[in-house]
Amino acid sequence: MSNTITQQSVNRSAAAEFDRLYTSLRRKEGRMYSDEELTLLPVINETHPYISEWRTRRNSCRALLSYIKQRSNILSIMEVGCGNGWLSARMANQVDAEVTGLDINTAELEQARRVFKKIPGLRFINGTINTEELADKKFDLILFAASIQYFQSLPGIINTCFEHLTLQGEIHIMDSPFYTGNEKEAARQRTADHYKKMGFPEMAAHYFHHSISDLDDFQYKILHHPHSWKNKLSIKKNPFYWIAIKNRYS
């Protein structure tokens, strides 16, 4: 029992340190939004420094909502790493499903609760996927949108998610980079250089570079391939994979 308590304390301490670093970094990068801006996301002023990023997310959001609306069996959704909750709120507003946003980022989650408190069927949980509040919860869709890179082991987090999936449930990964083996080292160096330049070199230890090959043991489907001819010819190019992973029991 004492070992378990010690491990829980270590996990909480690590989560708190990541929360502190991540929030400070986002403020310096200009990624913390006003309540008014948050209500409009992913639509944002055309002069905003991250307008290109938000155009991509707007297109991803539309595609995701369309996917969910076409499937009557998706009645419960959890977004892991929901941040300020804009996407969770969009889903709760536009699809017939209960939506849970999960994050350890206290500042953004408090803002999400304040801004989106009137949306029915939407709740936010401050914690990790191992929080007791989720112990017996099952979801039809578990979503990682621009968040999977903050999990060290891709197979590890997917296997943990399986414990919270309904039998026909799916895990979706969107808006995050994946690399080939040859690309990883250069990507790691770019990440380290960026965080050092921003004054948060410690953040490099919390950002992980995954490959599609990390999914070899799972039943997955690529719903959007950034290197496909269709994407290359599109005026709405999306540089990220969209991956759907079936429950291991399906």
Image (cartoon, rainbow, N blue to C red):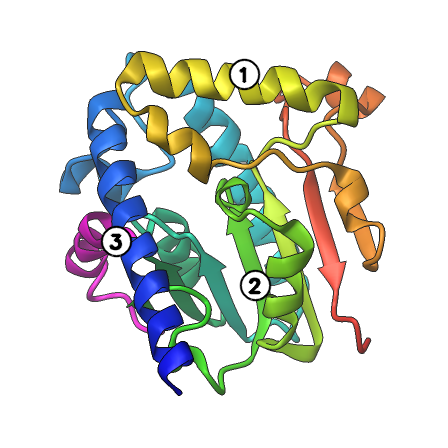
Is residue 112 part of the magenta span, yes or no? yes
Nearest to viewer (mark 1 / mark 2): 1
Write down the quadrant of residue 217 in the picture.
Answer: bottom right
Q: Earlier in the sequence, mark 2 or mark 3?
A: 3
In percent of width and height, residue 9 lies at: 30, 68
In percent of width and height, residue 69 lies at: 60, 61
Frontmost residue, 109 versus 233: 109
Query: Which amino acid, by three-letter code, is at mark 2?
Result: Ile
In percent of width and height, residue 92 lies at: 40, 63
Please say if 93 is above or below 197. below
Point 42% across, 52% down: residue = 81
For residue 28, side relative to residue 81 (left or right): left
> Which numbered dot is residue 16?
3
- Give the CA distance from mark 1 to mark 2: 30 Å
Query: Which amino acid, by three-letter code, is at mark 3?
Result: Ala
Q: Count neighbours of disc 3 (C-alpha within 10 A) and say few if under 14, some if 14 to 19, many if 20 or more.
A: some
Determine the secondary structure under disc 2.
Answer: strand
Point 35% across, 31% down: residue = 202
Residue position for label 2: 142
Please say if 57 is above or below 92. above
Q: Count neighbours of disc 1 (C-alpha within 10 A) and say few if under 14, some if 14 to 19, many if 20 or more.
A: few
Q: Which stretch is magenta?
A: 105-121
